[in-house]
Image: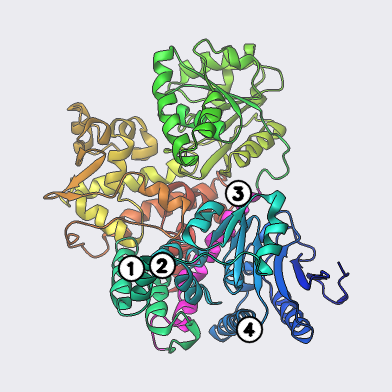
Amino acid sequence: MSANMQQDWKHWRLRREDTGLAWLDLDKADASTNVLSSEVMSEFARVLDALDAAPPKALVIASAKPAGFIAGADIEEFSRLDSVLAARMLVERGWLLFKRLAEVRYPTLALIRGHCMGGGLELALACRHRIVVDEPGTKLALPEVMLGIVPGWGGMLRLPALIGPAAALDLMLTGKSVDAKKAKRLGLADDCVPARVMESAARIVALGGKPAGKLPAKERATRWAMNGPLRKRVADKARAQAACKVSRANYPAPFAIVDIWEKYAGNALDVPASDPSSLDAIFSSPTARNLVRVFHLQERLKAFGKDSDFAPRHVHVVGAGVMGGDIAAVCALRGMTVTLQDQSVERIAPAIARAAKLFERRHKGDAKQVRFTLDRLIPDPKGEGAARADLIIEAIFENLDVKRSLFAELEARARPDAVLATNTSSLRLEDIATALKDPSRLVGIHFFNPVPMLPLVEVVQGEATDAEVLRRATGFVRRIDKLPLPVQSAPGFLVNAVLGPYMLEALRCVEEGIAPETVDAALVEFGMPMGPVELVDTVGLDIAVAAGKVLAGEGAEPPARLLKLVAEGKLGRKSGEGYYRWVEGKALKGAGKEAAPEGLLARLLSQLPGRRSPDARPPPPIPPGLAERVLAPLLAATQRCVAQGVVADADLADAGVIFGTGFAPHTGGPLHHAGSLVRHT
């Protein structure tokens, strides 16, 4: 194999075999991940010039980095775009460059190992063939919609043509990724192979030794119809489905994707500037700027814990209720041995059963992997695992005396270097730590329900918490792929402290005679994933009352109707009735109108932008200013948490409220939203 003679290329390496096959490896300089910066793209154009001058028999494009294929465009560069013209030039450069790649005379193949996102997938789509490596880290997606933009470098043209409009629009409108096996099933990849044979497979396919598979006649006919005479019908259905999940006013990008595919053959450059789906409209929308802001906030949270090498092999969880059981299950999913303690095996059994269902979903029915994961989750009614654990998490009910007694016992049994953590949602760490001989060992690791779905975890520092203990707790949160938010010990920390006043104001509106459905509709229209009254029902009315000052605020009393419902045993979803009646996990609103599907908040947070469910009937008329009224206490509480130092700054407060409550991502966060209101008055 000949050496690369193009020494002036900083990011690309070209190797030629005697067979005539050329290998082009991307290795972005001074970066751990490949991204398509303007410099990388300009250099790629020069690479194509060299290949035009001396065409290979075939070309394989791969990554020289272990971290993945290509993560997409350079978000930092995108964030610095200062005009619609600059954004349009960025799109045009990528569109023309990948069009040029698609039209070269020699066969091209993308060898995809690891993440292949956004512009990375658009580059792969411009190749004639694609091979994916069958590893857990291999993920393919066009997630531009999550940033409020569209796949402008050919994805809207080539993906529907390759896998059919229905599957392509589903991927582009949700931004969700597919693994290697699904990429092969969809037809997105020619083959899915183990890493040990990936180069041989790429060589065979690129040089023509393995022809691409031909679709069945029925599938070819279906795709022809959907791309041709049924194109408008497919587009109309996609728009209707998008409208059931988000509004065009808040999230214009999904609707633009459908319009551009249907009317402009996937070429965003052809859309007139006056069209609401134009690049001008998309890039001038505050949604795109705000969702890019949310992306950066998420990256900031991900950075916490990077300085920690704490990787607990054994976690001991005390409390096998819904919260504790799910914490244990998530740890087991991440490869940790987990002992789960409660008063009896009978109390632990429901948590194991629930974990088994989670493992089946996450392992996609792979019975062997489900069994291996279940083997790591060990019922431990006597609490013997506490003596061996690297990390102990308490997740019992909110009773200060009981928690104190438990921690005194755990401290006596635990290893001296074990981290002691509480999942308390409302008690001060300082009050719990009085039971410990060494209060510096206690840290808060506060999860949110449902634990497998919600990404945020508050890492709580008490007055005595040791810095190393805090660092370890934060590192653990990242090990289980959650977003750690450092907070100080204070009533409700951040998330519950802002949710309490928000839910209280919603219940006050109901107390004044506004229907719960109307209150909820106002906030869903604003962009919240679930209405606040439905959220109270979901959390539990008894828990709302027990939260006391966190919910009611200093000197205020819980609403009379709330107290009456609790006295009658109507506790919300868990009892079948609260402010709504609940049937099979769904709230019945009005005359048979159904609430959003269970887990909607979780799906919002794991897959931006926000999502909301279709209504069976038109929403009720919403009084002007209702959403603003209910949100006002939340905005004030968020600002108060910053002022009191519960979180370090306004950006972290915005991040915590977005990823902890589902606050409308298109606004950029509550404080960012409040600031925009001030700027526009």
Instruction: Return the disc, 2 or 3, that comes first in the chain's sequence.
Output: 2
Q: Which element type, helix, strand or loop, lies under badge 3?
A: loop
Q: Is residue 662 left or right of residue 545?
A: right
Instruction: Return the disc, 4 or 1, that comes first in the chain's sequence.
Output: 4
Disc 2 + disc 3, Cβ < 8 Å: no
- In depth, the one of 130 and 391 nearer the eye is 130
Real-space Cα separation, disc 2 to disc 4, in angstroms: 24 Å
Q: Which element type, helix, strand or loop, lies under badge 2?
A: helix
Disc 4 versus disc 1: nearer the observer: 4
Q: Which element type, helix, strand or loop, lies under badge 4?
A: helix
Provide the major secondary structure of the magenta segment. helix
Read off the magenta span.
274-303
Real-space Cα separation, disc 3 to disc 4, in angstroms: 48 Å
Q: Which element type, helix, strand or loop, lies under badge 1?
A: helix
Q: Which mark is residue 648?
A: 3
Residue at image mark 4? 100
Real-space Cα separation, disc 4 to disc 1, in angstroms: 30 Å
| Amino acid type, label 3 | Ala
| Amino acid type, label 4 | Arg
Q: Is residue 234 left or right of residue 635?
A: left
Real-space Cα separation, disc 1 to disc 2, in angstroms: 7 Å
Disc 1 versus disc 3: nearer the observer: 1
